[in-house]
Amino acid sequence: MVMGVDAVQGTLDELGTPLREVTFVVFDLETTGGSAAEHAITEIGAVKVRGGEVIGEFATLVDPGGPIPPFISVLTGITDAMVVAAPKFSEVLPSFLEFVAGAALVAHNAPFDMSFLKAACQVNGYPPPANPVVDTADLARRVLTRDETPNCKLATLARVFRSSTEPCHRALADAKATVDVLHGLIARVGSLGVHTLEDLRGFVRAPTPEQQRKRHLAEGVPGAPGVYIFEDVKGEALYIGKSSNLRNRVRSYFTASETRSRIREMVGIAERVRTIVCATALEAEIRELRMIGATKPRYNRRSRFPERAVWLKLTDEAFPRLSVVREVKDDGAAYLGPFGSSRTADDARTAMHEALPLRQCTERLSARVRRPACALAEMGRCGAPCEGRESEESYARHARRARHAMELDAEAVFSAMEARMSRLSAEQRYEEAAVDRDRLAAYVRTAARMQRLRSLTGIPQMVAASPAFDGGWDIHVIRHGRLAAAGVMPRGAHPTPYVDALVATAETVVPGPGPTPAASAEETECVLRWLDSPGVRLVQVDGTWSLPAYGAGRLVERIERAYRHQRGDRREGRPLR
């Protein structure tokens, strides 16, 4: 064959490495939880394959340096007794890195496994693995249709590709099943022109056919701050987002930079993109929150159910008690929250009970009707108003202290729980101390958050401004923690007419009861973050913007320091304190 003068012969590197010549190490990790920063590895299993043949295996249990949670033991079958004599991962890591040297790493949901591997390398002084990585879960989402498989879980794909090994949440077995899934997927992509490792990795990064077909939906989107709504053929919202530049953000959904599988699926269903231009980025963020809460699009994961917030209530009755409720009423009671779940609220209640001898029974008590006291009274943890040992007046002191601890000063609860944790640690009951630490954290974090929210929601009106990119000013009117108006003042303009006009046209806000009387906690937190941003100036404030002098905010850092200390103990194999 005679080559023309303009022809250039490609190098071997440009041609890529044929898949039949690539050495893959398919691996799986079992862990004590889902966070590489908080949890540890309990087992590693890996299979080395090339050209469809298995050429090596690597498997071992690993001592995580702490107890394995019971639900993890139920899921994996790995117990504390099984790992007590196992090596620590610091001892396993050098051998594993040698085993994977020069190979492409493969895992099902690779970001999870790689996060633990990278964290272990960092802790033990090794550079992060530079091996190319292939994620079979991501590859399967690209290759398979919903008609072929309802989901891309490993167990489902193992059945689709008739794997000889059934996944069972044990590392080596799951790695073997992933090998069969990998080979099945490689066979599929071969018909799509994927023949080298470089092709395979590029195939995953490329926009899907649905993304490419739907690019026209981004046409005509303005380059301004606002909210965008992906809608289906019926006009129902699939996904709602916000951006300081709508055009750039919407276009990104149709490029390779969008890698989230659920969002790519959403793009395939979407028939139009509707936009709402906003005056400022803060207005766009607030509108997004409100619209997600109102319409609950199925592809949004956050902020969909603000009404599910949970509160801890100090009841308004003759002998108040702490109750977990889902509604804030105008009933004179004190409220602490919002909490993300009833369990977290119950943890905070338990912490408060350690410091305050409030009754824990649920009956409605009366000074005229006597009942036998429970065991808590004999333990000195309740004043037993049910038996008449405490009058309404004397019991009211406990209720006032509880309200004070919820709204103003967390020191009493913090000190009582800290003393209990110190006693448990001295007795080497570290797991119980850790449980109490989590309860205290639930109380302190929520009290600090609520006090910060109340500092703004108690202000009838605030007007604040921040510098805009063009030299003007973004101006916002906030009433009881709710964004009531947003506008832009041009560069060089006199502020008074713009502020007066914005205040005059702002939403009328009638506050309701509780710490968040006019907006969701998330909305008020968005406003607070904006107020904390550089360059923001207060224009008008009706009232006083302040935090309690002895509030819970000053204790948050001590809680976070305890968690950082725990992570250090786990890495170094010391008991949790």
Image (cartoon, rainbow, N blue to C red):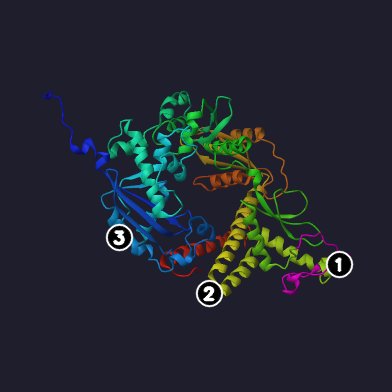
Q: Which residue is the extreme one toward the bottom?
A: 427
Residue at 60% across / 62% down in the picture?
Answer: 439
Main SS class of the magenta portion in the image: loop
Q: Secondary structure at mark 1?
A: loop
How many callouts does the rendering have? 3
Residue 370: give its label.
1
| Image position, residue 512 (x, y; %) | 72, 44
For this view, does 459 lie left or right of residue 559? Answer: right
Q: Could you say whether the residue bearing mark 3 is in a helix, strand or loop?
A: helix
Indicate whether residue 368 is drawn in magenta. Answer: yes
Dot 3: within a 10 Å radius of its alpha carbon, few (fewer than 14), some, or many (20 or more) residues?
A: few
Residue 172: x and y in percent read 39, 54
Q: CA distance from mark 2 to mark 3?
A: 35 Å
Residue position marked by numbered label 3 in the rendering: 95
Q: CA distance from mark 1 to mark 2?
A: 42 Å
**How many C-alpha atoms fall within 10 Å of the one at disc 2: few (<14), some, or many (≥20)?**
some
Q: Is residue 471 visible?
A: no
Q: Is 202 situated above or below 451?
A: above
Instruction: Tell me which label, 1 or 2, sits earlier in the chain.
Output: 1
> Residue 428, labelled with which disc?
2
Q: Quadrant of residue 365?
A: bottom right
Q: Quadrant of the N terminus?
A: top left
Q: Which three-letter amino acid code belongs to the residue tagged 2?
A: Gln
Q: What kind of residue is marked 1?
A: Arg
Closer to the eye: label 1 or 3: 3
Q: Which residue in the rendered view is the most extreme toward the right?
A: 368
Q: Amino acid at mark 3?
A: Ser
| Residues drawn in magenta | 361-385
Q: Earlier in the sequence, mark 1 or mark 3?
A: 3
Mark 2 and mark 3 lie on one chain; the one further toward the N terminus is 3
